[in-house]
Image: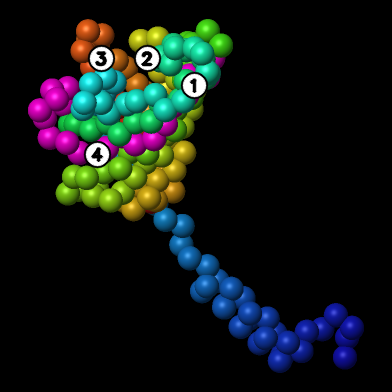
Amino acid sequence: MAPNAITPPLKLSLLLLLAISISTQSQPHQLKETNMTLYFQDVSAGPNATAVPITGIPGHLWTFASFGTVYCTDDPMTESIEQSSAQVARGQGIYVTSALDGSTTHVLISIVFTNAKFNGSTLEIQGASQQFEKMREVAVVGGTGKFRYAKGFATLMTVYLDTTIAYAVIQCNITVQHY
């Protein structure tokens, strides 16, 4: 027998191993892309505040522009700019004024969907937000439910601000790819 010859039982074993290997590999899932626009309804004062400072540098005023101030938020997110429009999610998480000059906040927000289409699903937003710029961009770093394995980005733009009543509306345009 030649030294490089493969015997019929060995050939059969290799073919079976190859067939098992091919059959156990799952086909790659097709990524979907979802685009949506939501509006954070942000109230930072009064009995119905949805964003409140929870800590900061002792002896300093805790404000959005004060380095080290940490806010906790649970903003309703609506389908249009009006506060009375249908709520589709809650923007829950924290943000920290992370630049010494107060210009940047580090955002860690979970968008927790409450509407029928995505109920219970989440998108996780994280990143540095230049809070006094007209347009800011942060990363979508994950998701759950209908947004499992999400990745993408969100742009944030303050479309309404009334400092006398501490109320702001932030438009959030989201583009994500997910399975």
Camera-nearest label, 1 or 2: 1
Distance from Cα at disc 1 to Cα at disc 3: 19 Å
* First in sequence: mark 3 vs mark 4: 4
Task: Quote the CA–CA distance across marks 3 and 4.
Answer: 21 Å
Q: Which residue is mark 4?
A: 89
Q: For mark 1, does the 10 Å Cα neighbourhood hold few (<14), some (14 to 19), or many (20 or more) residues?
A: some
Q: How is the image coloured?
A: rainbow
Residue shown at 10% from the left, 28% from the top:
84
> What is the magenta range?
80-99
Disc 1 + disc 2, Cβ < 8 Å: no
- The amino acid type of the residue labelled 4 equals Ala
Q: Give residue 107's quadrant in the image.
A: top left
The residue that label 1 is drawn on is 56
Side (left or right) of 9 relative to 72: right
**175 or 66, which lies in front?**
66
Residue type (three-letter) at the residue carrying disc 3? Ala
The residue indicated by pointer 3 is 166
- On the image, the x and y values in percent for residue 16 come to 61, 83
Task: Mark 1 or mark 3: name the one nearer the start of the chain.
Answer: 1
Residue at the farthest front position? 59
Q: Earlier in the sequence, mark 2 or mark 4?
A: 4
Residue marked by disc 2: 135
